[in-house]
Image (cartoon, grey):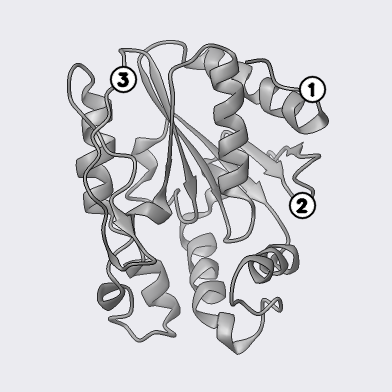
């Protein structure tokens, strides 16, 4: 189905064409990375729509559907920034049920989600299959940490000011809109660790200013 043209859709179509030109065959993983509240989920959904519009077999996943149980997430204290960075996500399961079988191709089945954080329990297994040429778009924070970088064929990093990101989070949940509020220390400082240790801008094939989601713009990093 053809999408209705808009600045956002036109931007996503151009990005789709760029990725498809460089990765036209085989199984392809695309990361949509960014801080919490940067809009990774909505951006990845829109990108998946433009890929499907162009005729590509497209799958969506979110790293938020591969979280650890609460007891594991909070093993370094519920307010620990290092705990947020180290313990939030279950990368072993992510690789085992999605990355490895998707890469394998053929008849291997894969899962695009494994854990329901609201119930703090695993999801019932739902195995999917794909053809030889397919794309899987994964969104969420911390996607360019060192142990994940080898997964992505193409990585997009969304830039959004902290104040804008936390205002969005506050609209959709029990989060203080002030990024410096003590209640945000775990996620805010945990993401600071990520930005300092992983430097996701340097790993990105595209950096996108997503302050206004309806008018995303490409940002080109300094060459020096």
Q: Residue 89 appears at what percent x and percent y?
A: 34, 60
- Find residue 29 and name its label: none
The residue depicted at 69 percent of the width and 63 percent of the height is 168
Task: Give the quarter of the figure containing the N terminus.
Answer: top right
Quarter of the figure with residue 95? top left
Q: Could you tell me if the residues under marks 2 and 3 are in contact, i.e. CB atoms within 8 Å? A: no
Local crowd size for mark 1, using a 10 Å CA cut-off: few (<14), some (14–19), many (≥20): few
The residue depicted at 52 percent of the width and 11 percent of the height is 55
Which residue is more in the foreground, 145 or 44?
44
Q: Residue 140 appears at what percent x and percent y?
A: 49, 51
Residue named by callout 3: 130
How far apart are the two marked residues, 1 and 3, measured between alpha carbons?
Answer: 29 Å
Local crowd size for mark 3, using a 10 Å CA cut-off: few (<14), some (14–19), many (≥20): some
Q: Residue 150 appears at what percent x and percent y?
A: 35, 38
How far apart are the two marked residues, 2 and 3, measured between alpha carbons?
Answer: 34 Å
Q: Nearer the viewer, mark 2 or mark 3?
A: 3
Quarter of the figure with residue 215? top right
Does label 2 or label 3 sit earlier along the sequence? 3
Residue named by callout 1: 5
Residue named by callout 2: 211
Q: Secondary structure at mark 2?
A: loop
The residue depicted at 39 percent of the width and 19 percent of the height is 134
Q: Quick check: 175 above or below 219?
A: below
Q: Residue 51 appears at what percent x and percent y?
A: 56, 21
Q: Nearer the viewer, mark 1 or mark 2?
A: 1
Does label 1 or label 3 sit earlier along the sequence? 1
Quarter of the figure with residue 180? bottom right
Task: Give the quarter of the figure containing the C terminus.
Answer: top right
Q: Quick check: 157 above or below 160?
A: above
Q: Secondary structure at mark 1?
A: loop
Q: Quick check: 56 above or below 180?
A: above
């Amino acid at each position: 189905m053809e999408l209705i043209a808009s600045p956002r859709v036109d931007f996503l179509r151009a990005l789709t064409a760029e990725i498809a030109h460089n990765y036209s065959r085989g199984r392809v993983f695309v990361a949509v990375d960014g801080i919490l509240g940067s809009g990774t989920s909505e951006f990845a959904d829109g990108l998946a729509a433009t890929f499907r519009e162009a005729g590509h077999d497209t799958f969506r996943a979110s790293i938020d559907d591969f979280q650890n149980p609460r007891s594991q997430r909070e093993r370094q204290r519920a307010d620990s920034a290092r705990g947020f960075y180290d313990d939030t996500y279950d990368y072993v399961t992510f690789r085992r049920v999605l990355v490895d079988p998707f890469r394998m191709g053929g008849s291997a089945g894969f899962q695009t989600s494994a854990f329901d954080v609201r119930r703090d329990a695993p999801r019932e297994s739902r195995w999917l299959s794909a053809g030889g040429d397919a794309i899987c778009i994964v969104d969420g924070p911390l996607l360019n940490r060192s142990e994940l970088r080898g997964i992505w064929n193409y990585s997009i990093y969304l830039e959004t000011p902290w104040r804008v990101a936390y205002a969005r989070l506050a609209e959709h949940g029990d989060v203080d809109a002030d990024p410096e509020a003590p209640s945000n220390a775990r996620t805010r400082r945990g993401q600071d660790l990520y930005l300092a240790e992983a430097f996701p801008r340097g790993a990105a094939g595209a950096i996108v200013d997503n302050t206004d989601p309806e008018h995303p713009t490409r940002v080109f990093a300094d060459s020096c």
